[in-house]
Amino acid sequence: MAETLLDIRGLKTWFKTDDGMVRAVDGVSLYIDRGETLGVVGESGCGKTVTARSVLKLIDMPPGRFEAGQILWRGRDVIPLSPEEMDKIRAREIAIIFQEPMTSLNPVYTVGDQIAEVLRQHDELSRKQALSGAVDMLRLVNIPNPQKRVHDYPHQFSGGMRQRVMIAMALSCKPQLLIADEPTTALDVTIQAQILELMQEMKDKLGMSIMLITHAMGVVAETCQRVVVMYAGKVVEEAPVEALFGNPRHPYTQGLIRSIPRVDRAAARRERLEAIPGTVPSLLHPPVGCRFAARCKYAMDICVREMPPLKEVGPGHRVACVL
Amino acid sequence: MSETLLSVKQLKKHFAVSGGILKRTVDRVHAVDGVSFDIGKGETLGLVGESGCGKSTTGRCILRLIEPSAGEVWFQGTDVTRMGHDALRSLRRDMQIIFQDPYASLNPRLTVGAIVGEALQIHGLAKSRKAMEERVVELLETVGLQPDHLGRFPHEFSGGQRQRIGIARALAVEPKLVICDEPVSALDVSIQAQVINLLEDLQEKFGLTYLFIAHDLSVVEHISDRVAVMYLGRVVEIAPSRALYDTPLHPYTEALLSAVPIPDPTVKRKRIMLQGDVPNPIRPPSGCHFHTRCPIAKPDCSQRDPELLEKRPGHWVACHYRG
């Protein structure tokens, strides 16, 4: 049995707004084992990004607050930790990369300086050593001509190259867990393929775990071992990747998979896509019962009245649906 | 193929890059660099390519939202590029556009009724206020919105609903050709399927012709009869959807297709990894623009421009060594 690195239990991260409390993450439990890639999928506003940021406590509080739950990082709850202790975790153990690399890099420092800063936080290094470490990191993520590029500023890199720089920076602290929040959403497909391959390569080389936050089912299918599907602040299904795509049990997961046009399916061409009717419910006043009930074609009376708990339907396969 | 509705011939758009104190033109971006294609009546032509390949600029040049630098755009027997102001205005009754960003393309200070009704007013298509309102309600119902949405403002709608408003606005003048510029890229997958299905229904109902511009190959494959692939301002391949996806001839098309993630973990494919990024369109590579990243490039590819030739019936490709 693999060691569990991260274990989130019943997490509720809510936000206070003028209109009331937004229950962005409303009772989420998930775990990540050492060396595995967990995909967290769902559409905009399902709470996947807030869950990821909660792990590193990158949520502005207020307006946000942890209403309930635990985030166990190697057995220790991070929620009560002091900012200094969090800094240590962020510097050495968990790294995060974001969707838009331009906004997460500092435009007035060279990428070399930025990577060197991370390296120096991690180890006692001279400026020179840190800079040569930065060159090594750039080389590791396949940036051509790293000795020269280390002195360039973020704006001198293309989108794909910037994401490589971000990955280099994230990996500089030799993390045990890399949280990748929509790392390829802003990129073109050919560049996306490069970045996903790079992440895979880095994972194999450094033996870290990855929590991949994405809305793209294709990306999940190709990179993850296990998947958690979120809808309106809750986990609706959790399964090994083969089971999730081969035998999706939650009507929302089924809908998500069927609503995507497939390049590889000649027969499916020009057939109607199976759209999910309606839209995501407001998290200000989420429905009492199953949050998907209003859009679900199988919904029954009980679905509107009670929130179904996650129950085991196969090895490692859990689903929150009465059916 | 049926009767040709739109014929684009050697369309070019060069944007000036100014620099220096005097803001003189120091360079030109060859955004669209000699693009030609036809669209038959009732057909959907997909236009795909990565960011910066010139696909959106091509779409806008056809409508003359951007003035083309050279080339011809024949629509129903007249050259759009030579039209005067009045002719252009009546042309826009026949040609409409749907934009990517449903948040930015609707005036936030107008009600939905006013947004959709505006075109009716401009073209004098409604005899009275009452007639206009009736027509707007009819249009809203056509795109799946409620009649009581008439008096609401864009911010009260979700992304998918806003895109429906944009579609209703385009349909108001009963166009023949609709240019869809990334109409579903900003939407979540479940909503994306709703909008794609709607576009297909409307095409059938009103006999519309679409130029469907998108970067997502699976969506384009799904909706298009034929697909044109662009790279750095040029069309590198045009073929019926099926032929393009089953037997891509151009190495770029091949790489692009192989980079699309498939939402099925049991499908294992050989991925053609393209090295590096798309070159700068200010100084595109000589000869075949793709030769710097092409896996099968030979020395003369940098010398000679490949012509777009019909290598198989209906299947055109611009490559010296394929087909």
Image (spheres, rainbow, N blue to C red):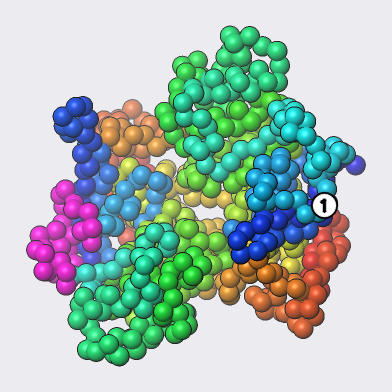
- Chain hosting mark 1: A
Q: Is residue B80 magenta?
A: yes
Q: Mark 1: which secondary structure? A: strand
Q: Please state the horizontal and vertical placement of residue B78, each as a whole percent of the image.
A: 12, 67
What residue is drawn where x is 35% and y is 71%? B110
- B127 relative to B56 in the view: left or right: left
User: Which amino acid is tagged 1?
Assistant: Gly
Q: Which residues are magenta?
A: B63-90
Task: Note whether residue A246 is visible.
Answer: no
What residue is drawn where x is 29% and y is 52%? B57
Q: Please state the horizontal and vertical placement of residue B289, each as a whole percent of the image.
A: 32, 37
- A259 relative to B185 in the view: left or right: right
Which residue reaches farthest front?
A18
Q: Please state the horizontal and vertical placement of residue A19, each as a whole percent of the image.
A: 61, 64
- B7 relative to A225 in the view: left or right: left
Residue receiving disc 1: A69
Residue A166, compared with residue B116, is above or below; it is above
Q: Is residue B19 magenta?
A: no
Q: Quadrant of the C terminus of chain A?
A: bottom right
Q: Nearer the viewer, residue A38 or A66?
A: A66
Residue A142, compared with residue B306, is above or below; it is above
Which residue reaches farthest right?
A1
